[in-house]
Structures are given as C-alpha cells and as structure tokens.
C-alpha cells in the first residue's frame, strides 16, 4: 500500500488508493482497538493511516486457496504458526497487513493476546487485487525484506503467476511450476496452480 493506484468514481473524479485517513484522537499504532472501524483494509506506514477498499472476488478466492495451501503444512510443522485475514505486524513503527504469513512459534513468546505481532514473519504473502498495480506489491515486498522477512510470495490472479522474493533472488513462476522450497520453510513447495484452483 505504499504507492497510489487510481480508481474512477461515478462522478468522473479519481480517488487514489491508498486513501490517507485522519487519525482518531486517541489513536495508538500499537493498540488495534484504537484504530477506526472501516469496511476495508488499513495499514499505518510512513506516519500515515492508509485505507484500501475491501477485496473483490478473485483476490478473496485466491486468499482462501492460500489458506488451504499453508494450513496443512503448518499443522505438520508445529514449530510454525500461520496468520491470514490481513494479519497485522508492527515493525519499525509501521503496521503492515499480510494476506498470509508464517512465523516461527518460538519468536512469538511473550506475545500479548490481541496485539500486533512485533517480529517479522519467515514468510509474508500478498495477493494482488484489482486496485493494486504489480509494482505496489513489489515495493511492499522490498519493505518486508528490509524489515527481516525471509521470503515473500506475491500472487497475481490475472496472470496466474507467483513471484518469489528473497534478499538475493526474484523468481517469476507460471502455473506449470512449483514454488521452490526455502531452507527456512522445510518442505513448503506448493504448485502455483493450487493458488488459483478456484478461478477455473
């Protein structure tokens, strides 16, 4: 959400996403209960409270498939814990929200229930929406990597492709390929087409 994408309004004007919202008077970045209640997605980044609209059909279906891919793997690897539904993480003063993420369980010791995770996940996953350009997600992926995330997956429903990014690598994988297993995520090597199974 670090660069704007434009969506036309019925009036013929353009609104550029993300929309920067005025912070509530008692807003605290580390307390989710002080954030505004909105229909959509929020992040706090570069001192701004940023809003994106709710996701549309394809993005939601791919996020659901992402859960079906990560869920069985997490159940077999109890040293990890997974999160989805715009899972928030507070890193270096910013709260970013991932469509899916996986943490090492031992890094979350002392986590206070109901608060944002304060350590980077091993894996962060973003699914492109109709209101997001590819470069917006790549910029967010670079932010993740700069803040300690080991692996980032970017899922693109339109192209039916996955981009895998690490500090030293950027792969673009079509439906015919599988995501390569990373040493930090042993045995996690899903087929690209499994993320898009619901799209036909």
Image (cartoon, rainbow, N blue to C red):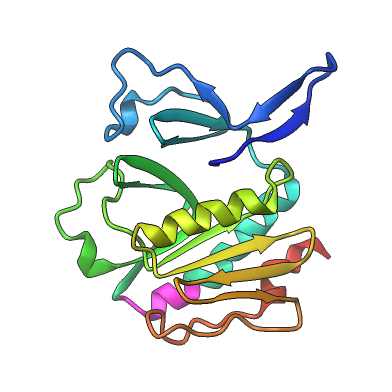
Percent of width and height locating residue 162: 66, 69
Residue located at (63% from left, 69% from top): 163
Percent of width and height locating residue 39: 57, 28
Q: Is residue 74 magenta?
A: yes
Q: Report the side of 34 relative to 193 (left or right).
A: left
Nearer to us in this view, 138 or 154: 138
Q: Would you say the magenta stretch is mainly helix, strand or loop?
A: helix
Nearer to us in this view, 53 or 8: 8
Q: Report the side of 63 relative to 85 (left or right).
A: right
146 lies above or below 19 = below
Residue located at (29% from left, 46% from top): 92
Residue located at (50% from left, 30% from top): 50
**Could you tell me if residue 86 is visible in this image?**
no
**Could you tell me if residue 124 is visible in this image?**
yes
Q: Report the side of 16 relative to 40 (left or right).
A: right
Q: Looking at the figure, which quarter contains the C terminus?
A: bottom right
Question: In which quarter of the view is residue 189 placed?
Answer: bottom right
Q: Is residue 149 magenta?
A: no
177 lies above or below 89 = below
Question: In which quarter of the view is residue 19 placed?
Answer: top right
Percent of width and height locating residue 146: 39, 59
Q: Which residues are magenta?
A: 72-78
């Amino acid at each position: 959400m670090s660069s704007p994408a434009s969506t036309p309004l019925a009036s013929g004007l353009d609104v550029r996403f993300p929309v920067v919202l005025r912070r509530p008077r008692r807003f605290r970045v580390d307390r989710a209960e002080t954030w505004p209640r909105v229909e959509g997605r929020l992040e706090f980044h570069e001192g701004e409270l940023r809003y994106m609209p709710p996701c549309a059909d394809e993005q939601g279906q791919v996020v659901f498939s992402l859960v079906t891919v990560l869920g069985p793997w997490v159940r077999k690897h109890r040293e990890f814990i997974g999160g989805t539904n715009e899972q928030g993480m507070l890193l270096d003063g910013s709260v970013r929200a991932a469509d899916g993420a996986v943490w090492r369980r031992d890094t979350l010791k002392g986590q206070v229930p109901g608060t944002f995770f304060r350590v980077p996940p091993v894996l962060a996953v973003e699914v492109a929406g109709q209101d997001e350009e590819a470069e917006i997600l790549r910029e967010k992926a670079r932010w993740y990597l700069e803040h300690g995330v080991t692996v980032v997956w970017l899922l693109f429903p339109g192209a039916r492709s996955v981009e895998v990014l690490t500090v030293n690598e950027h792969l673009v994988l079509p439906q015919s390929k599988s995501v390569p297993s990373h040493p930090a995520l042993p045995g996690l090597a899903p087929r690209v087409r499994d993320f898009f199974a619901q799209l036909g």
